[in-house]
Image (cartoon, rainbow, N blue to C red):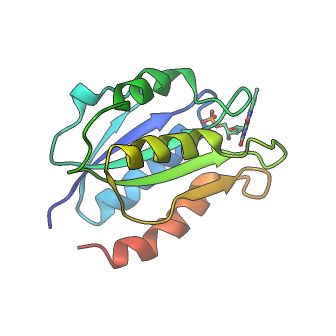
Amino acid sequence: MDRHFTLLVGSVLGASEYVADAIAEALRTRGYKVTILTQPDIDDIDEDSTWFICTSTHGAGELPDNIRAFAAQLEDEDLNDIEYFVVGLGDSSYDTFCYGAMAMATLMDKGGATLMADPLHIDVLHHPIPEDRAVEWLEPILDTLD
Ligand SMILES: Cc1cc2nc3c(=O)[nH]c(=O)nc-3n(C[C@H](O)[C@H](O)[C@H](O)COP(=O)(O)O)c2cc1C
């Protein structure tokens, strides 16, 4: 299938953007079309695309500011036709480790979207180059994707 992926990025300090760029590169290498949205808005997403959420967590388990409005858009949204992936960045010294990514997955699930692989939660304490971890996780998944 000719998939189009839309990367939906939540980031404060830029680390999740680096991860999204590395994911985009891995996807493009396999011939997939990729769009990266760093100010995600539901109206900007190609309706046939596979969603790929890539977000960090800040505050006390909060989503980054740039993805909060998008998260609010998903409340009560019918997402039955959507297939999605989730990658979260966080720091396990917080007891709210990767809560932002979990919140996004919960919203997607409530809307009826289909999760394509167990979410990856990258602990930046143990993975100082999180984009390497993301690509290492993604490659075998892409091997099995139609
Ligand atoms: C002020 C602050 C608060 C944070 N709060 C959390 C948190 O609650 N949970 C978590 O897992 N990580 C937390 N982190 C870690 C970030 O998610 C981590 O550094 C991540 O790599 C940042 O990615 P970004 O540059 O894309 O925003 C926090 C970091 C900072 C600086």
Provide residue 18's location: percent of width, then percent of height.
53, 43
User: Is 14 left, or right, of 29 in this rendering?
Assistant: right
Residue plotted at (63% across, 53% down):
130
**Vertical arrangement, residue 142 with respect to residue 101, above or below:** below
Q: Position of residue 44 (x, y in %)?
A: 23, 28
Quadrant location of residue 56? top right
Q: Quadrant of residue 95?
A: top right
Split into 4 quadrants, where in the image is the C terminus?
A: bottom left
Q: Position of residue 80 (x, y in %)?
A: 24, 49
Judge by depth and name the residue closer to the eye, 15 or 74.
Answer: 74
Eyeballing the image, is 53 above or below 66?
below
- Residue 46 in percent (x, y) is at 18, 39
Q: Quarter of the image holding residue 65?
A: top right
Q: Tell me the quadrant of the picture where the N terminus can be found.
A: bottom left
Residue furthest right as drawn: 93
Q: Residue at x 40, y 38 (%)?
A: 8
Residue drawn at the location 14% of the way across and 62% of the way down: 2
Residue drawn where x is 52% and y is 52% of the image: 87
The image quadrant where one finds ligand 1 is top right
